[in-house]
Image: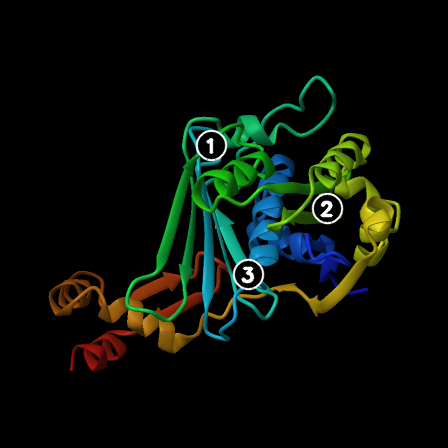
Amino acid sequence: MKDYIIRGIDKKGNIRLFVATSTHMVEEARKTHGTSPTATAALGRVLTAAVLLGITMKGERDALTFKIKGDGPIGSIIAVSNNGGQVKGYVDNPYADLPSRPDGKLDVGGLVGKNGQLAIIKDLGLKEPYIGYSNLVSGEIAEDLVHYFHLSEQQPSAINLGVLVDKDISVRAAGGYILQLLPGVEDKDIDRIEGILKKAKPISTLIHQGLSPEQVMETLFGEFEMEILERKEIEYKCNCNRKRIEGVLLSLGKEEINKIIEEDEKAEIICHFCNKKYHFSKEDLQKLMD
């Protein structure tokens, strides 16, 4: 079964919920980048969050970039998504890893680091993109994103992101949900949600048990009579092509391209997101110069 997201709202119109299964998407990213188990979990959480946020954008050409940079050994984690359910991403140090925590879980917080920033950049086709920042609170990503929504968008949220890595380092289960409280929500409903979240199993456990996004929604928040508004398939997909890479080379300027021609007589550009290699001969570079 393909990965997908559902978007729902309760019958009172006070609770908005997004739920995604992202197992195949995260496994594709792991195979693309050869990530260590803990790096797979960290990248998988960021990719899942990015694709959940990406479908909230309205324009087909709108893009959302989710970036986390802590002081841990993984370095930066970057994911870019759109409203079509496509996402791509990478980490600075895909082979970085740490021993598991005392509770047996992967130490994503340690790999990312607590000291650093989270940034969300929305390119909506305007002159300048919208950029929001917040400091990291744990490096566990979901908690950091809740903190971001509270500070930057004054949006009360509950977020759960999870990646279960198998013994053979492949992805066994991955997914996430974002619940947001809308204006007018009553205190008693907030208390009910807090009670549910305290007892809830991790999202990766629910998905590993075979629950679909619809079943996750019903299992956790069924008492609120949720209505599904949208269902959308999601995938790991890079949209790089030779034309885009030529644009990257052109952005270097004539002087730098001429320097490459004189010193190397060729260029090899590797896409960060999919590791595809683009080769440019001396003649290709000369055409760009012209």
Tag 3: amino acid: Gly
Query: Observer-nearest residue: 209 or 6?
Result: 6
Vertical position of residue 95 compared to residue 231: above or below = above
Badge 1 or badge 3: first in the primary sequence: 3
Q: Secondary structure at mark 1?
A: loop
Q: Residue furthest left?
A: 255
Badge 3 or badge 2: first in the primary sequence: 3
Tag 2: amino acid: Ser
Q: Position of residue 264 (x, y in %)?
A: 22, 62
CB under 8 Å between discs 3 and 2? no
Quarter of the image with the C terminus in it: bottom left
Tag 1: amino acid: Leu
CB under 8 Å between discs 2 and 1? no
Residue at 14% x, 68% y: name it. Answer: 258
Label 3 and label 2: CA atoms lie apart by 25 Å
Judging by the rendered image, the residue that carries numbered circle 3 is 54
Q: Secondary structure at mark 3?
A: helix
Residue at 43% x, 61% y: name it. Answer: 271
Vertical position of residue 81 compared to residue 172: above or below = below
Label 2 and label 1: CA atoms lie apart by 28 Å
Query: Observer-nearest residue: 97 or 57?
Result: 57
Quarter of the image with the N terminus in it: bottom right
Label 1: how many Cα within 10 Å (few below 14, some 14–19, many 20+): many
Label 2: how many Cα within 10 Å (few below 14, some 14–19, many 20+): some
Q: Which mark is residue 170?
A: 2
Please tell me whether mark 3 or mark 2 is closer to you in this view.
3
Q: Residue furthest top?
A: 102
Judging by the rendered image, the residue that carries numbered circle 1 is 136
